[in-house]
Image (cartoon, grey):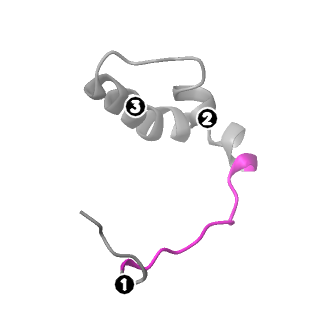
Amino acid sequence: MHKHLTHNKTYATCAEFADATLEFLREKIPRTWDEFSDSVTDNFRVIKPKDFRVVS
């Protein structure tokens, strides 16, 4: 996602960034899944909310 949305690119507003992100996830990925499928990994970590505390 970084390579296609934010690498060497900025957005004037948060709404523009959100629109670009949603378009990428909803339209670009489904249309070109073969291109992206090799870069998706199963290496992720489950974050449990009870393991963290909010400091304010």
Task: Give the foreground label among 3 and 2.
Answer: 3
Which residue position is annotated with label 3? 23
Q: Earlier in the sequence, mark 3 or mark 1?
A: 3
> Residue 26's x, y, as percent?
41, 39
Three-letter amino acid code at disc 3?
A: Glu
Residue at position x 39%, y 18% in the image: 11
Q: Earlier in the sequence, mark 2 or mark 1?
A: 2
Question: Does 2 appear above or below 7?
Answer: below
Left or right of 35 in this view: 12: left
What is the distance, in whole Å, between disc 3 and disc 2 at their CAs? 13 Å
Residue 46 included in the magenta stretch of the image: yes
Residue range in magenta is 38-49
Circle count: 3
Left or right of 35 in this view: 1: left
Which residue position is annotated with label 2? 32
> Residue 25's x, y, as percent?
45, 40
Q: Residues within 10 Å of mark 2 (few under 14, many from 20)?
A: few
Q: Earlier in the sequence, mark 3 or mark 2?
A: 3
Q: Residues within 10 Å of mark 3 (few under 14, many from 20)?
A: few
